[in-house]
Image (cartoon, rainbow, N blue to C red):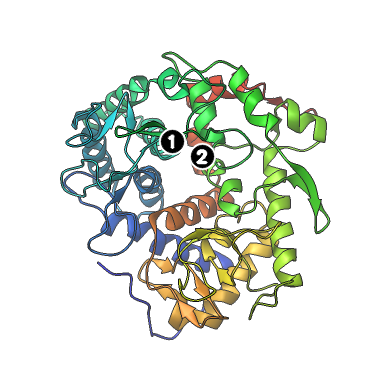
Amino acid sequence: MAAETSAAQSESFDDDTGFLERVQHHAFDYFWLEANPENGLIRDRSRSNSFCSIAAVGFGLTAMGIGIDHGWITRAEGRGRVLNTLKTFGEKPQGNTAEGVMGFNGWFYHFLDMNTGLRVWKCELSSIDTALLLAGVIYAREYFAGDEHEEARIRELADLLIRRVNWQWMQNGGPSLSMGWHPERGFIEKRWIGYNEGMILLLLGLGAGNGPLPPQVWKEWTNGYEWKTDYGQSFVHFAPLFGHQYSHCWIDFRGITDAFMRAKGIDYFENSRRATLAQRAYCIANPQQFKGYSEWVWGLTACDGPGRGMFKAYSARGAPPAENDDGTIAPTAVGASMPFAPEACLPTLRRMYDQFHPEIWTRYGFCDAFNLTADWWDTEVLGIDQGPILIMIENYRTGRVWKTFMKAAEIQRGLKAAGFKPTKG
């Protein structure tokens, strides 16, 4: 079903709490309504012919707990949807053939058919998207801790999926993990080294109970960091904001540091705060003179774009330094940074809503992107947008996703293996 924009007049909110509740509820609806309830698979984007994105499923599994906590669905409804999802990933075939499978060696293909659950598009067996899926699986296991038979079954299936991942295979004899694998041509040459959204992938591998990655992998990862100062902020750089957000959806990095961050005197949470503020400052400075960029119109990350003339289509946009910046703004870049810099993000979201409501607001909340220079407004919504918005606003408001996920033995082992220690007060 399409996420058509709403022509209705924007709603007035008595306070920020009411506004955030509405944003979250609409974002949750994406994962409830853009799913196949029979198998739990969730569309990559809000078009009827979209394939399933396994990353969207990971965000969606987490969304179920948030929906229960807010009373948008019952616990029975949420666990039923989660159980169907985990059954699908636990039971669909795995193998090294190019067709007729969902994954191989415990890893899963990036895109799946919404009905059959099998590989489409000749897409890659994706290491990062499998990690985002597993994050949702682990969250669901920790959230559904009750005595009911269905909740016990959720935990059993979650453990099966987590144990089944062959981490050494994806390492393929190298210093870190490959970004993926194709049955037609083998492993992707590029590896997870240097700062981006891959922290959660490596930490899950380091903490695996069955054949974990060696601690040296984390050292290789941090060897690729680029510490620079831009717009008055010193931090490990990655231009698109999603790289500073995705791992933080589940992992609470406040007050813990690895060797690299201890040497810099900050934690990864503060690093993401600085990245957010630096990007906002870049947009205020507006060196390329795009229409609308200001303290109220900013937010660069992976998103759709106009795709005509000088304007790119779907691209990983970011700054600083400028990367694929063509004037396209993504509300998820702001919403998913809410815990890091609420004093900047919350008023920006409210201003975007008030100023651009007829064009920007959909049945699932904020649309994917807009470009004032091109007079272009996206009519679609992506699961990997709405998930971070929903989860990070929840972490800002209650911290419940962090509290639940951080109970997982896998993540605690992974943080320890990577050398994380509490920051001394």
Q: Where is residue 189 shown, x and y percent of the image? A: 49, 33
Assess whether mark 1 and mark 2 are in contact (beta carbons under 8 angstroms): yes
Residue 409 coordinates in the image, percent (x, y): 49, 21
Residue nearest the observer in this picture, 148 or 159? 159
Q: Is residue 1 above or below residue 216?
A: below
The spot of residue 407 in percent (x, y) is 50, 28
Horizontal side of 125 relative to 328 (left or right) equals left
- Identify the residue at image location x=32%, y=23%: 105
For the residue pair 190 and 105, the one nearer the viewer reads as 190
In the rendered image, the vertical position of residue 193 relative to residue 420, given as above or below: below
Q: Identity of the amino acid at label 1?
A: Ala
Write down the quadrant of residue 104 in the picture: top left
Q: Which residue is drawn at 43% across and 53% down?
A: 384
User: On the image, which quarter does residue 65 sit in?
Assistant: top left
Give the mark nearer the N terminus: 2 vs 1.
Answer: 1
Image quarter hosting the N terminus? bottom left
The numbered mark at residue 250 is 2
Crowding at mark 2 (Cα within 10 Å: few <14, some 14-19, many 20+): many
Q: Which residue lies furthest to the front in this view?
A: 185
The amino acid on which the numbered mark 2 sits, given as a three-letter code, is: Trp
| Quadrant of the image containing the C terminus | top right
Q: Position of residue 369 (x, y in %)?
A: 49, 69
The number of numbered badges drawn on the structure is 2
Mark carried by residue 415: none
Q: Is residue 15 visible?
A: no
Q: Residues within 10 Å of mark 1 (few under 14, many from 20)?
A: many
**Mark 1 = which residue?**
135
Q: What element carries label 2?
A: loop
- The residue drawn where x is 63% and y is 29% is 221
